[in-house]
Image (cartoon, grey):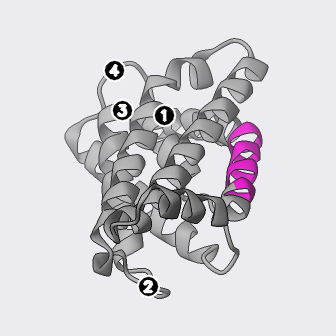
Amino acid sequence: MTEKKLDRTKRVAYTGLFIALVLGIGYAFVLIPNVEFVLATIFISGILLGWKTGIVVGTAGELLFSALNPFGSGLVFPLLLFFQILVGGLVGYTGGLLRRVIIYGNSYRKAAITSATAGFLLTFTYDLLTNLSYPLAAGFDMRGIIATVIAGLGFSLIHIITNTFVFLIFVPYISRLLHKVLLHLE
């Protein structure tokens, strides 16, 4: 958006649209293991709408996506749900912090590298916390925790690598494009 503040009605509408997009894109890819666009969508919401709205989109989007997931609701596993919501908010917040580099920066290459680095770190954080949720909730000792994290390492690597590329290729392009489109709508 522009530096001027969005009016309240538009901000609420854009927030609702991004939360709906998180759900729609999340469920569209739910059958493809460890390939998702949820974190990227939340990140873009932070870039376009600012860190506060990014947190709202991230926390609400992750809560609804996990709670309503037809392959297993996060409501039955509170620590996992908590970590998903926590990282969702962190992703939206980080997008808001990096908006100047990604949208307004002169160098598209710098925007892409910044976005990819953020995608790598945020996805790593997401996978680490969600993989730790079960052994922590179940009371595993350190050996059990390490074994569980190692068992999930292959899936995590796929997720981290694919998200790094999603953040590298799609996030800067889509963010800049949507920014231009939304400017014309105001």
Dots 3, 1 in contact, CB < 8 A: yes
Q: Nearer the viewer, mark 4 or mark 1?
A: 1
Q: CA distance from mark 4 to mark 1?
A: 18 Å
The C terminus - image quarter: top left
Residue bearing mark 4: 4
Residue 169 drawn in magenta:
yes
Q: Amino acid at mark 3?
A: Trp
Q: CA distance from mark 3 to mark 1?
A: 7 Å
Q: CA distance from mark 3 to mark 2?
A: 30 Å
Can residue 16 be seen at all in this image of the molecule?
no
Q: Amino acid at mark 1?
A: Gly
Q: Amino acid at mark 2?
A: Gly
Dots 4, 1 in contact, CB < 8 A: no
Q: Secondary structure at mark 4?
A: loop
Residue bearing mark 2: 72
Residue drawn at x 68%, y 41% is: 167
Badge number at residue 51: 3
Q: Amino acid at mark 4?
A: Lys
Q: CA distance from mark 3 to mark 4?
A: 15 Å
Above or below 33: residue 98? above
Give the mark nearest the N terminus, 3 or 1.
3
Give the mark nearest the N terminus, 4 or 2.
4
